[in-house]
Image (tube, grey):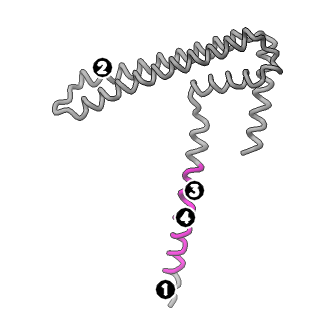
Amino acid sequence: MRTKFMMAAFLLFILIFSLLAPGAYSYGREKASMQHIDIGCKFFSAANLILENSAELTLSDEQVNRIKALQNETEKSLIRSEREIELVEVDIKAQLHGDMIDPGILAKFIDQKYELKKMKDKALVESIMSLNSILTEEQRKTLTSLSSKCKKEAGRRE
């Protein structure tokens, strides 16, 4: 009798744990992924924040047009870069699935892939710097206060 009770309690514990574990796991992964936001996301978030608050920042029409043009060019450049990276990834997969794997060629493709990623990130950093250069010093200060206000509001929602 006691053995059956212990076995039932153990199975109940396992059942409860198995139901709760996936939720805890996904919550942890979500938190971890939020800490690593890619540079492109930062650029587009900043540009959208600026455009959404153009009245508060007192942006001129020329500044708005320059920001929109920069967004457009950055998005096109990002798409091109990502496609080039995907093409190199296809070459890597083809090399890995071939009959004879040539380590020299494979290393060349891997170097090429990470060189393209490096160039993409550098271009995004340049876009962020260009975005900041469009704003005046006073507008940058106002943007900083708006950004911190948005982060505080986002922290309250979590």
Q: Which sits in the foreground, 101 or 49?
A: 49
Q: Are marks 4 and 1 in contact (CB under 8 Å)?
A: no
Q: Residue at x 77, y 43 (%)?
A: 156
Dot 1: what SS?
helix
Earlier-in-chain disc, 2 versus 3: 3
Main SS of the magenta part reads helix
Residue under pointer 4: 19
Q: Which mark is residue 108?
A: 2
Dot 2: what SS?
helix
Residue under pointer 3: 23
The residue stretch that appears in magenta: 7-27
Q: Position of residue 104 (x, y in %)?
A: 24, 21
Q: CA distance from mark 3 to mark 1?
A: 30 Å
Earlier-in-chain disc, 3 versus 1: 1
Q: Which mark is residue 43?
A: none
Earlier-in-chain disc, 4 versus 2: 4
Q: Which sits in the foreground, 64 or 130?
A: 64
Q: Position of residue 35 (x, y in %)?
A: 61, 36
Q: Position of residue 92 (x, y in %)?
A: 30, 28
Among the 4 quarters of the image, the one containing residue 69: top right
Earlier-in-chain disc, 4 versus 1: 1
Please name the amino acid that badge 2 sits on: Lys
Residue under pointer 1: 4
Q: Residues within 10 Å of mark 3 (few under 14, many from 20)?
A: few
